Every structure is written in C-alpha cells, then in structure tokens.
Image: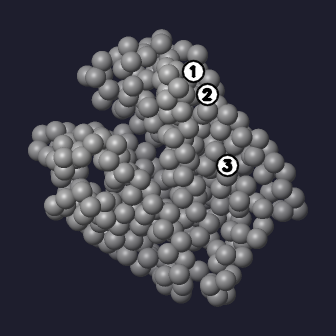
Amino acid sequence: MKKSLIALSMGTLGLGMAEFGMMSILSAVAHNFDITIAAAGHLISAYALGVCCGAVLLVFLAQGRSLKMLLIALMLVMCLGNSMAVFAPDYPFMLTARFISGLPHGGYFGIAGIVAKKLSPPNRQIEAVAIMISGMTVANLFGIPLASFLVHTFSWHMLFVLIVLWGALTIFIIGRWVPEVPALPSKGLSAQFKFLQKPLPWILLFIIMAGNGGMFCWYSYINPLMLHKAGFNSGDMPVIMLIAGTGMVLGNYASGVLSHRFSAVRITQIMILLMLFASLGIFLTADIPWAAIFFMFIGTFGLFGVSGPEQDLIIDISTGGEILGASGAQVAFNLGNALGALCGGIPMAFGYGVQYSAIPGIAWTLFGLAAVFYFKNLYIASKS
C-alpha cells in the first residue's frame, strides 16, 4: 500500500471521529451546558450544515491551488474547529465550533478522492479511493471506542483533544508522504458548475442520498433497537458497535477487491441490494438477538462498501468540476443521514415499535436501487 494513501486515510479517520464521536457524548455535553438531549442533537446538525457550506465554499477557494496544500489547509480548519470545542464555554460557542469543524469534511473527501485516483493506475483507482475512505471505517472500529474510553475516564473534552492531536499528526504525515499534485486545470468558475447541467451527477447524488439514507432510517436508532427490541443490555453495546464497525471496515475492503472484477456501477448495485436485504431483515427479525446482529453487520458492510465506487463515479462524471462533484457526494451522504433519521422516527411518532423505522428505510433504498439501474443505462451511453 502506498504511504500517500495511508496519509490520506488518516485525514478521513480524524473527520470520522469528529462526525460520529459527537453521538457518543451527547448526554455528557447536554449535562455540562444544562440543555436537553434534543438541543444537544443540534450540535450534530451544525456539523452537517458545515459540511454542506464547506463543500460549496471550497469551489470558490480552490481555484489554481495545489491539491496537497488544500488538504493541509482543510486539516488546519478541522484542528481549529475542534480546538474551539475543547474550550467551548457555552452552548452557542459550541454550535459555532461544530459548524467550523464540519466545513472541511466534504472538501477533504473530495480532494483526497481526486488525489487517490491521480496517484493510482487506472485499474486500481476504485481500490485507492476505498483505501482513502477506510479511515472513516477505522474511526468507527477503533477511534470512537478509544474516544469513548477517554471521555468516560476524564471528560467529554478529551474527544476533541484527541481529534486535534490526530489532525496535527495528519498534517505532518501529509506533508511528508503525499507528493505534490498540481492544481486541476481551471476554465473559470462557471466551468466548475457546468457538469451539473447533465442528469448523470444529479441521479448519482440522489442514489447516494436515498441508498445511504435508507440505511440510516433504522441505523440511527441502533441503540434502542438492540436494547429494547433485540433484548441486549447496555453493557453489550460496545461489543455490538465493534461488530458494526467491523462490517464497515470489511465492506470498504470488499469494494476495493471487487473493483478488480466488477465496474463501479455493478458494485454499487450489489451494496445497495445488501442494504435492502438488511433493512428487510431488521424489520422482520429484530426481536431475535443473533439475527439483529447479523443484519446490522450486513447493513454496515453495504453502507461503506458502496462509498468507494460512488466516490469514484462522481469524480468520473464531473469533469471540470471534480472538487464540487466529489465534495457534493459527502453533502448527499450527510443529507441522507439527516433525512434517514427523520423518516425513521415517523413510525415511532405514531406509536409503532422501533423496528418499524426500517419501513421508510426499505422504501428509500428501493428508490435508490431503481435509480442505479436508470443511471447505469445513461452512464453506459455516455461512454459509448
């Protein structure tokens, strides 16, 4: 494995801890700032809003700049936002810190994906992007449990201390291991948006939002699913989340291996089908402990198995606007995350059990799967 790809994945690991780590400390933060859990949840939304704003803002700031320097600059912004979180004196300041922390997220994934493709031969580009994304899966497998240990041993501030230290190390490693990559050719700011005049990128962004959002309809409620439906106790949750993280790691690895035999579109179809299978399984068998674990694993396997090929495809079809396209994929992912949690909560608001959160997930995933088949025909036609 190239050292440059390891360096890129270190950045996605730090961003993964920043994005998902907040979920594990909500109660402690709410208590510290004397706010409700619902208000603390807005700290997750603030990060997502930063992701969306940062992805668009980067298009205006990236013109003619070295991709390596952009990666370092984005890591510096991540360190700034999380440093503010360490010393946040009150809730409004913390909201600002979370917004700033989210700004580099989409842009980093986008630029790192472009760099990974440029540093790899054509037949290994999907695998290279999967390696870059692997940092996010490792964050869920090891980074979040480590942060949780530090949080419960010391305080919730330690999560952000860990992220800042990791970000500083990542800046150093990127500087040493990632070669200079020239700026993308620029034909003016308007040219960056020109690819959006075609239907392909919009369809793919919908696939990312709907396919992944369907999974988040019920995965957002994995804690009550496992405790109140499958019958596990709270002490089992660290092991359960470790299994979920293992599914993410293996799914991401599998997409890289499959890329030697199948196209990115075909891998996307396979992974979304797995997420549909997982959603159906959770709805039908959530009260069976081993089945709930099995379908959770299949779901997280598909969730991160689809990330690499989707990122590869969006870069491929956004010629002239690669940074916006690749960053937009992360915006679509986060939008799917937010909409999935919202839609998954609707059945429970009407008094149905937590397993019914999978019903809107099944619908969203079916929409995403149908869109993949439509996308495939247009994509093949565009290549002929």
Q: Position of residue 382 (x, y in %)?
A: 84, 62
Q: Position of residue 207 (x, y in %)?
A: 67, 49
The Cα–Cα distance between marks 1 and 3, rounded to whole angstroms, is 22 Å
Q: Decide: few, some or many residues near mark 3? Use Cα within 10 Å; few <14, some 14-19, many ≥20.
A: many
The Cα–Cα distance between marks 2 and 1, rounded to whole angstroms, is 7 Å
Q: Which quadrant would residue 244 be assigned to in this image? A: top left
The residue type indicated by label 2 comes to Ile
Q: Residue furthest top?
A: 288
Kindly identify which numbered label has been placed on residue 271.
none
Q: Are marks 2 and 1 in contact (CB under 8 Å)?
A: yes
The mark that comes first in sequence, 2 or 1, is 1
The residue type indicated by label 3 comes to Ile
The mark that comes first in sequence, 1 or 3, is 3
Horizontally, residue 227 falls left or right of residue 90, namely: right
Which circle, 2 or 1, is nearer the viewer? 2
Q: Position of residue 220 (x, y in %)?
A: 45, 36
Q: Closer to the camera, 250 or 195?
A: 195
Query: Dot 2: what SS?
Result: helix
Kindly identify which numbered label has been placed on residue 359.
2
Disc 3 marks which residue?
207
Query: Dot 3: what SS?
Result: helix
Q: Position of residue 87 (x, y in %)?
A: 16, 62
- On the question of residue 195 being in view, the answer is yes
Q: Residue at x 79, y 44 (%)?
A: 373
The residue type indicated by label 1 comes to Phe
Q: Which quadrant would residue 284 be assigned to in this image? A: top right
- On the question of residue 122 being in view, the answer is no
The Cα–Cα distance between marks 2 and 3, rounded to whole angstroms, is 18 Å
Disc 1 marks which residue?
283
Residue 178 drawn above or below residue 92: below
The mark that comes first in sequence, 2 or 3, is 3
